[in-house]
Image (cartoon, rainbow, N blue to C red):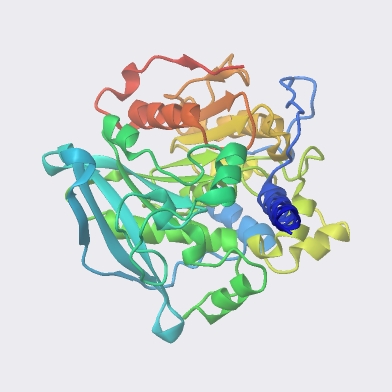
Amino acid sequence: MMLIWQIVKWSIRLVLAAIIIAGMSACTMLGLNYASLETDNKAAPTPALSLPFDDVETRATLENELYGPWPGNLPVTFGEARIVDDNYLGGRGTLEEITLTIGDGDTARTFPVVIAYPNKAKDTPVPLIISQTFSDNCSVFPEDPVTEFGGTICEGTNMTGMVGFLATNIFGTYIAYAPIDRYFDAGLAYASFPGWSFVPDTNGRAQEVMIELSPGPRPTSALMAWAFGFDAAASAFADDPRIRADAIVAMGHSRYGKSALIASGWSDRIAAAIAHQSGFGGGSSSRSTTGERLDRMAKSYPHWLRPDLGKELEDGYQLTLDQHFLLALSAPKPIFLGNGRRDVWSDPNSSYRLAQAADLVYETRGVEGLPDGSDMRDFDPAAEISYWMRVGGHSVVSEDIDAFTAFMNAHFSASSRNETTLQSAQ
C-alpha cells in the first residue's frame, strides 16, 4: 500500500511539474537553437525612417494600430512611505514602501511599491531603477516583511518547492529575487512592483480592469497600461530628495521589457529603458517570421495588444510601422536591449537590425546611438542604443545584472563617459 501511495504521489508531482513548465515556457521556446549573428544578408527594416522624425504622428499610429491609447488622463495618488527596515542589508541602506493608486473611485487599482535606498542617497540623490516583476513582492524581497498585493505582510518567499526550483532553473536566479546588494554597489536605488498588480496578466480579466478604470481611456492594451504604471511609479519618486528625477529608469524582462520601451517612448519622467529580451511588441520586428512572431503572440496573449488585433493579423492585416519606430521614440534617451543567443523565440537578430535602423534618429538628435562598426557580439554600456547579447536563453542571470549596472553607471554616474567598453560573451 505504501509503495502504491509513493507512486501516486510522485505521479502527481510529475504532472504538476509538467503543467508548470508548460505555463512558464509559454513566453519562450525551450530549445537548443541559436540566433543568427548574420545581419548584412537580411532585408532592411521597413518602412525606412524618414527625417525629420515625427514623434507625435508615430505615437498616434502605434496607439491606433498596435497598443491602444496612452492612459495619461488617469489620476495617480500615493500614500506616505512606510519604513520596512531602516537598517537594511546590515546598515547599507533603507527599505521602504509606498501605496500607489491609479484611477478614481471604487474601480481604482491600489498596490504597494517597494523601494530600497542606498545610504549614499542621504547625502546625494541617486539614480533609480523601477522594475516591473513577474513575481510578488514577497519573492523579490524574500527576507523582508514587505506588503504583497492585497495588503498582507509577507512571511518569506513564495518561490519555494517545485515552482521555485523550476522557475530559477529555467528562467534564471533573478527572475524573481532582486540582488539589491549589487544595485547598492553600483550606487543605485531600486523600486519594484508586479506589473499584474495594476492590470492582471490574464485575458478577460485584464480587459475588465482596464474598462472599469475611471476616467479611461478605453479600450487600451495591458502593455500600454503597464507602461503607464512605470510613469505612475516615477511620479511618486520624482520629488524625493534622495532620487535624481533626471535618472529614473524603467526596467523589465520579456513582457515588461516591452512595456519599459513603451514607457520610455511616451513618458517624460522615464529617462531610459532597460528592456531585457523584450521580443515581439517590444524591440523585435513585427514583420519577422523567426521565433514567436507577432501574430502568435497576439493569439496567445490578446490582452497585451489593442482589441481585435490578433484576429485582424490572422486575416492578413499589416501594421504600417515596424518596431524601429518604437525604438526611435526614445531618442536621444539611452535604451538597453538585452538578448540571449539561445532566445530565438524573442528574435535577437531582428532586434539588432531594428536598432541599426533607429540609429538614424539618434544621430540626428546629437548622439551616436548604436556604435559604428559594431555587431551583435559587441556591448558598449555607454552607447545610447546599448545592445547586449550573452549565451543562454530567456532568463535573468548574473551576467545580466552586471550589464544592467554597467549601463546605468555609464549613463548616470558622475564619470559616465569613462566606462570601458565590454565584450559580451559568445
**Quadrant location of the C terminus?**
top right
Image height of 130 relative to 105, above or below: above
- Residue found farthest to the left: 123
In x, y percent, where is residue 200?
56, 67
Q: Tell me the residue at 19%/42% (across/down).
A: 93
Asked if residue 238 lies left or right of residue 355, the reply is left
Camera sees residue 52? no
- Numbered disc total: 0
Asked if residue 247 lies left or right of residue 263, the reply is left
Q: Tell me the residue at 50%/48% (across/down).
A: 260
- Residue found farthest to the bottom: 106
In x, y percent, where is residue 77?
31, 71
- Residue found farthest to the right: 315
Camera sees residue 336? yes
**Quadrant location of the N terminus?**
bottom right
Q: Nearer the viewer, residue 52 or 176?
A: 176
In x, y percent, where is residue 405?
38, 30
Image height of 91 relative to 420, above or below: below
Residue 111 position by quadrant: bottom left
Q: Nearer the viewer, residue 5 or 222?
A: 5
Asked if residue 383 lies left or right of residue 115, the reply is right
Q: Nearer the viewer, residue 275 or 87?
A: 87
Q: Nearer the viewer, residue 35 or 420?
A: 35
In x, y percent, where is residue 407?
41, 29
Q: Tell me the residue at 47%/29% (across/down).
A: 398
